[in-house]
Image (cartoon, grey):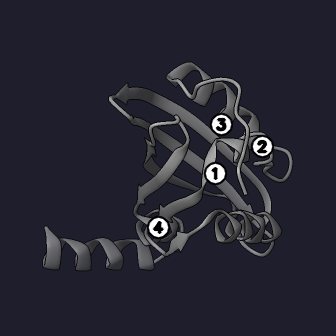
């Protein structure tokens, strides 16, 4: 699959497109940013590594099915060379759990044609979730401090 992109991916365009992706009152829609992803995209986060656009798109659809709503607030969107970085707060509402904010950052690596060839997301999934679970929040932080702090 080859996507035809007319506008180069810039900081301003990332801010515009990603702000349209996540809806505080409904499900996310990635269809308008998919054309910026190369067919050989490598996506990695704290949970998984996905290679190829088809698998990346399927991963996005799985997240959509799990969520009641998903909202993302971007900050500090910057570009250095062929890498666009951003910080974010993603607030998710799953079907059977309370609304949970996750704090993280994303690095988008662009190839020579300006398409996203690599996306690396960084976040502390369990720490952000356990912050809202009584008793687990203190225990998790204590364990993390003991072994990693």
Contact flag, marks 3 and 4 (Cβ < 8 Å): no
**Position of 39 compared to 132: left or right?**
right
Badge 2, how many Cα within 10 Å: few under 14, some, many 20+? some
Badge 4, how many Cα within 10 Å: few under 14, some, many 20+? some
The residue that disc 2 covers is 24
Q: Give SS at disc 4.
A: helix
Q: Give SS at disc 2.
A: loop
Mark 1 vs mark 3: give the one in front.
3
Mark 3 vs mark 4: give the one in front.
3
Q: Earlier in the sequence, mark 4 or mark 2?
A: 2
Q: Give SS at disc 3.
A: helix
Question: In percent of the image, x 78 and y 50: which residue is there?
Answer: 28
| Quarter where residue 87 is shown | top left
Between 41 and 27, which is closer to the camera in this rendering? 41
Is 139 rendered above or below residue 9?
A: below
Q: Give the residue at the far top of this rendering.
A: 12
Q: Earlier in the sequence, mark 1 or mark 3?
A: 3
Residue 18, disc: 3
Percent x, y of residue 51? 54, 70
């Amino acid at each position: 699959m080859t996507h035809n992109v007319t506008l180069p991916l810039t900081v301003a365009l990332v801010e515009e497109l990603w702000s349209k992706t996540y809806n505080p009152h409904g499900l996310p829609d990635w269809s308008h940013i998919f054309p910026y992803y190369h067919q050989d995209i490598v996506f990695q986060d704290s949970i998984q590594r996905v290679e190829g656009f088809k698998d990346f798109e399927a991963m996005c659809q799985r997240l959509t099915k799990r969520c009641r709503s998903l909202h993302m607030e971007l900050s500090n969107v910057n570009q250095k060379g062929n890498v666009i970085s951003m910080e974010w707060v993603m607030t998710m509402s799953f079907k059977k759990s309370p609304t949970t904010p996750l704090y993280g950052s994303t690095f988008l690596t662009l190839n020579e044609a300006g398409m996203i060839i690599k996306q690396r997301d960084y976040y502390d999934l369990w720490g952000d979730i356990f912050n809202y679970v009584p008793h687990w929040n203190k225990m998790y932080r204590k364990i993390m401090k003991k072994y990693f702090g």
